[in-house]
Amino acid sequence: MDNFTQHQGLVLPLDIANVDTDQIIPKQFLQKTERVGFGQYLFNDWRYLNGDITQVNSQFILNQPIYQGASILLTRENFGCGSSREHAPWALQEYGFKVIIGTSFADIFYQNCINIGVLPITLTEAEINQLFTQALHQPLTLAVDLPKQLINCSDTSYTFELAEFHKYCLEHGIDSIDWTLTKLDKIIAFEQQLPAWQ
Amino acid sequence: MASTLYEKLWQRHLIEDKAGETPLIYVDRHLIHEVTSPQAFANLRFLNRTIRHPERTIATMDHNTSTRSLAIDAAGPEAANQLRTLAKNCQDFDIEIFPIGHQNQGIVHVIGPELGLTLPGTVIVCGDSHTATHGAFGALAFGIGTSEVEHVFATQTLRQTKAKTMKIEVTGQLPNGISAKDIILSIIGVTGSAGATGYVVEYCGDTIRSLSMEQRMTICNMSIEFGAKAGLIAPDETTFNYLANRAYSPKGQLWQQAVNDWRTFSSDADAQFDKVIQLDATKIKAQVTWGTTPGQVTAINNNVPAPTDFEHPVDQHSCAKALAYMGLTAGMKITDIHVNKVFIGSCTNSRIEDLRAAAAIAKGKKVADTVSAIVVPGSHRVKQQAEQEGLAQIFIDAGFEWRLPGCSMCLGMNDDKLAAGDRCASTSNRNFEGRQGRGSRTHLVSPEMAAAAAIAGHFVDISAAEIA
């Protein structure tokens, strides 16, 4: 996993609540056995007319010229609700998103992001409203500093919370499986005291 | 100190809780299927990792299988490739698998319990968000992503943040025709679609105690639909009776030891929860979703809401967006909504009791000319039992199609899809935009309500005389 320290990028303001994983990557693209190839289908049903990848829906905000190259997704509450499919954060990452800022995230989606090196940031509704007002008005660039847990805007800044271990893994590109395998003696000792039926 | 059921499960499985690290917990049972596992196996191979306990993992084929044919390629070449990949991975890594047509095959959350793979006091995970279903047995069960599937393969553990606790107490006798689906949809209607994010929910109260295991599974299954990490119901005699003599349940002396242990898995009387919600079962009416999240739900005797019925601007916006997608007009009666498709199935409502409830409504009636309706049992065992009990014949005589088991139209990964503009009364768990097919419209209901809608061609109040 690549490590994540600072990132500066253009914001895509997706002003929709409860964006579910079926919207992020519809089920017809889940039949792959590889981890790549999902980015082009990100938000497929909103992004293309009749779900046809050759017919771009120019009304959808992701397709608007001023937001091309966006790498920070601004959204609202309960982003990533629904299915556990890691294909959703894979699609977002492959499209180019490195940071997602919202008022809340579904638990499984949040953990999936951490596990692949995408940074999910929770801000208050008032802060999110401020950012939407700016980003919908004109292109907005933010600078995200993970070690300082800070988002810098042109004239203001926002602090954010992150679990210590999540921050450590993102900052250092830690593979949590390698980390856990260093604890094998503890796992074996634990297994030895399990009741027979379990 | 008094503990909740969740805290007891957590304590039993906690391997290490070290400052600066996310706690490490043990996983007793890992269920896998074809969609969310291939990339985990591929990475294991790539990094030359092994599976620590292949005997703690069980595989089934469900998401991609055809409900018309047992042929592996019946749902198309990509589906067949994914199914074959699962079979090969299981062979290479020595994992037990129930392939298409095997008597134990079916939807992962149906077969786990019916085979006795789902046990109280355990931690169960699966790369599927409806894993919360297994919480009906007093197991801590939750969905995980593919990176975590690999983590479990390689270590038999997971890193998990401890959740907050929520108690949902349901009391009183359910009115006639009202079932578990109506209880859980009512709860989600109260909490909203993210009301339990960050929580593990325990369902309790005399109404819950009186439910069968099938009904309890329906409730726990939809815990994720209001954001909960997991849903729990403390095990009791109903649980033990259900599990006794199942194929993979402990036997003999081990069974007795297990039951004695399982009896300790309940919340202490004075345990403290972070949040408590109470619901009066006597007031629950049949529920129908009108929008595009499960929280956009109302009672059968109500009208479709208007954006102005909501206080918060985000909710107003969501309502307007949902009405436009669903092709509904604010203020219209729910009973005036006509459907042209009916789906009875999914990990929420495809067990034998669900089919009995739907068949009781359908018996001697005919599906409306304007409706096509399918019944998809959750597993081969459910299918066989329904055929033996005569339920399948009741459905067939009424004009329903009787299909082979699988996830089917709940998410339409196979060819059981809705067309754009189709409107479906569905016993599944998600009414998201495009969930059952691009441009299709889903209304979540109970099996009884779905059967009644199939016959009438529109939603009906099943407590009213016209159907009951």
Image (spheres, rainbow, N blue to C red):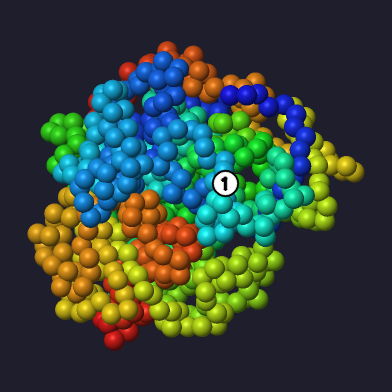
**Numbered circles on residues, count:** 1
Q: Callout 1 environment at 10 Å: few (<14), some (14 to 19), or many (20+)?
A: many
Q: Quadrant of residue B95?
A: top left
- Disc 1 on helix, strand or loop? loop
The residue located at (27%, 44%) in the rendering is: B73
In the image, taking residue A64 as reference, residue B8 lies left or right, namely: left
Q: Is residue A116 above or below residue B405?
A: above
Residue B200 as seen in the image, left or right of residue A11: left
**Residue drawn at (56%, 52%), measured in percent from left and top?**
A54
Amino acid type, label 1: Leu
Give the camera-side residue of B316 and B162.
B316
Residue shown at the point (65%, 76%) measured from the top left? B308
Q: Is residue B177 visible?
A: no
Q: Residue at x 65, y 69 (%)?
A: B316
Q: What percent of the width, then of the height, locates residue B337?
A: 43, 79
> Which of the pair A14/B240 is nearer the observer?
A14
Q: Residue B449 placed where, x, y %?
A: 33, 72
Residue A111, horizontal then vertical, whole percent: 55, 37
Q: Which residue is mark 1?
A: A42
Tell me the chain of label 1. A
Q: Quadrant of the C terminus of chain B?
A: bottom left
Residue at the outermost left position: B388
Q: Position of residue B23 (x, y in %)?
A: 52, 28
Outermost residue to the bottom: B465
